[in-house]
Amino acid sequence: MAKVLLINSNRFKHPWPVIPFGLCYIATALETNGNHTVRFLDLCFSSDCELDIQNSVRNFVPDVIGISIRNIDDTGGFNVHFLLEDVKNDVIDYCKKEFQGPIVIGGPSVGISGKEMLDYFDLEYAIRGDGEAVMPEFVKRIENQQPLEGLRGLIIRREKTIIQDNEPFRVQDLDSLPFPKPLRYMDLNQYRRFGSPVHIQTKRGCAFRCSYCTYNKIEGNQYRLRNPKLIADEIEILVKETGINQLEFTDSIFNMPLAHTKEVLREVISKKLDLRVHTMGLSPAAVDEELLDLMKSAGFNEVDIGAESACDEVLESLAKDFKRSDVIKTADLLRRKKIPVTWFIMLGALKETRETVLETLNTIGKVASKWDLVFVSTGVRVYKGAPIADEIMKNYIHCTSDNFLHPVKIEPEKISLEDIHSIATDFSFRFPNFYFYEKEHIIPGWLLVTANYLLKAFHSHQPVWRLLILLKRTERFLAITLIRKWIYTLKMRSFDKNNRITNGFSLIIHK
């Protein structure tokens, strides 16, 4: 029986701290399927990572350390925050200093750039795919001193060279996985203060091929559906055990396949739980009144829609399966059903022009409720494995030195990212519900905690981000917005145009 120290390295708290449910699945699998002893170290709120890692390693004396790494960077915005640098400095380096045994990394980011991350961190092992199956076998082989070569899902690096990059392992029967036990491994009090939700997947995999997306690479390109009844059972258990009634469905696209989604909602409704439900991905391609009625009955008090654009030409270039008319129809339905929406808009696709940018922003500004949040990012971040990355590498092989691990953003031929950012900034001054999805606009932790406390005190089921819109409306009433706009205008005049893009490489694509 081996001793395994599992470390949550994610310290990024935007839009709120994320409870590491994925790592809880791994911990549960190690104990259930491998009979191993697990110690859990959550560094999300750590004030001294070095000391916490040192104490955990010296007190527990693990045989293996597993580190979960959620994000490579913050995915969007004019300035990209490369989060792996923080992970290296705050977690990896201290683990290597304190522990001489095998360290293995895993998590969504490893599913994208596992080989490159091993080089960046100077480590030997990475697991991609479904870690619930691979990690117990990895630890077993380490314990029994068996060869690691040939283990599906495992990447092996020796003497600074990748010697094996085995295919990701996909668990076909997701219903066979044990339910996670978060309270067994960590203290959730800090997460409760921020209003962090319980995470649930109804499936894994994605059947779509959006040009910029890597979900296919992380989870596979075919849906692996969970039993709707078991999903509802897991929700009921987690809510009762954790005391958290905020729930987030974390599927790549929640409402695909539509029939399965509706059946999941019916099972959740049958539990008669008092829930506040949210989903990170609702596709405009499959929204009807029945779906929204079921969502409201299940407790949905907000949804996220990754529309990205409201221009047909741009949507086609992004390989989206919906059109501008679907975006408008979905917005109308959601407004009539009074379901709050966060719209995610990504400006800067290859086909983008000044006209398409204005069409998107004007359309969303018109169809979205004034109390819906619109998150706007400038520039398409290119990741390894995304269809657009494969296309770029055919003609621009030297555009990246580490296979897109560090940020690379495309720049359309007919408009610069600086001009797109300027147009979007003007809209953010005009519309109080428009926000930029970038590090300059990260919500302060104290504000999120305060807002969550107020909502609970007044028993409000409104999403917390509506207080942000209220704040911007107040600033506009007090003329603070005019001052901000004036300062921004002066700042832009003082900078040379060629120096406006920072923390990322911009690649101009001519087609």
Image: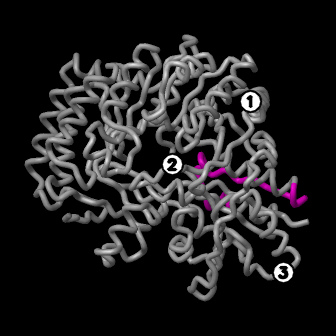
Residue at numbered disc 1: 232
- Screen quadrant of the C terminus: bottom left
Q: Which residue is drawn at 58% across and 58% down?
A: 69
Q: How far apart are marks 1 and 3 (CA)?
A: 40 Å
Which is more N-terminal, label 3 or label 1?
A: 3
The answer to the question of whether label 1 and label 3 lie on touching residues, with beta carbons closer than 8 A, is: no
Which is more N-terminal, label 2 or label 1?
A: 2
Of the residues tagged 1 and 3, which is closer to the observer?
1
Q: Residue at x 54, y 44 (%)?
A: 252
| x, y percent for residue 340 | 45, 21
- Quadrant for residue 336, please give it: top left
Asked if residue 453 shows in the view, the reply is: no
Q: Is 436 part of what is drawn in magenta?
A: no
Residue at numbered disc 2: 12
- Magenta residue span: 33-53
Of the residues tagged 2 and 3, which is closer to the observer?
3
Residue at numbered disc 3: 146
Q: Residue 100 carries which label?
A: none
Type of colouring: one colour
Which is more N-terminal, label 3 or label 2?
A: 2
Numbered disc 1: secondary structure: helix
Q: Residue at x 34, y 20 (%)?
A: 369
Quick one: label 1, few (<14), some, or many (20+) residues within 10 Å? many
**Amino acid type of the residue tagged 3 in the rendering:** Gln
Q: Is 34 part of what is drawn in magenta?
A: yes
Of the residues tagged 1 and 2, which is closer to the observer?
1
